[in-house]
Image (spheres, rainbow, N blue to C red):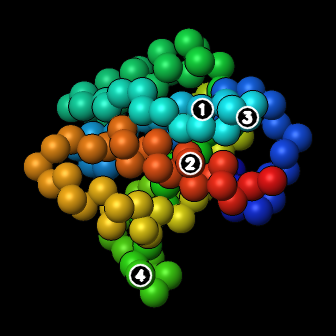
Amino acid sequence: MPQPTSTLTSSLSGTLLAFDFGLKRIGVATGNTVMRQAQTLEIISDVTNDAKFIAIAKLIASWQPVLCVVGLPMHPDGAANEMTQRCQRFANQLHGRFGVPTVLVDERYSSAVLSAKRGERIDDQAAALILQQYFDQTP
């Protein structure tokens, strides 16, 4: 089950994958616990959920992450919105299917940072921003 960011310590060592979950696309970023720098990886645009999870399985097999980070969208006041529960479910599925520890990171302000790039596919950049927030919030 996904954990709040604060429950993890700096004892993890290795590669992390971050996901900006959306109904049409899933942005993916990577980073590691040594450099603590997030980098865009790819955008998964497959139509079906099965195809999306096949693409994710390939990434997990290739990158062997020690942790998955999933952005958790909320309203500015911290209240849940229509995507909050879907992202929690996605995080639960990542953990359940692949056995990789998963954390949720508040992504309330990541969209504001990227809003200037409207019209572009920025899902991978959003995932990198979510991962960088995780690195910046954990010791």
Residue type pointed to by label 4 = Pro
Instruction: Identify the residue position indicated by label 2 in the image.
Output: 132
In primary-sequence order, the first of circles 1 and 4 is: 1
The percent position of residue 48, horizontal first and vertical second, equals: 26, 32
Q: What mark, if any, has residue 76 been given in the picture?
A: 4
Q: Are marks 1 and 3 in contact (CB under 8 Å)?
A: no
Q: Residue at x 48, y 33 (%)?
A: 39
Q: Label 2 neighbourhood size at 10 Å, few (<14), some (14-19), many (20+)?
A: some
Instruction: Identify the residue position indicated by label 1 in the image.
Output: 31
Instruction: Identify the residue position indicated by label 3 in the image.
Output: 33
Q: Residue at x 45, y 87 (%)?
A: 77
Q: CA distance from mark 2 to mark 1?
A: 8 Å
Q: CA distance from mark 2 to mark 3?
A: 11 Å
* Residue sitting nearer the eye, 37 or 76: 37
Left or right of 21 on screen, residue 5:
right
In primary-sequence order, the first of circles 2 and 3 is: 3
Rendering quarter of residue 56: top left
Q: Residue at x 21, y 59 (%)?
A: 116
Q: CA distance from mark 2 to mark 4?
A: 20 Å
Q: Label 4 neighbourhood size at 10 Å, few (<14), some (14-19), many (20+)?
A: few
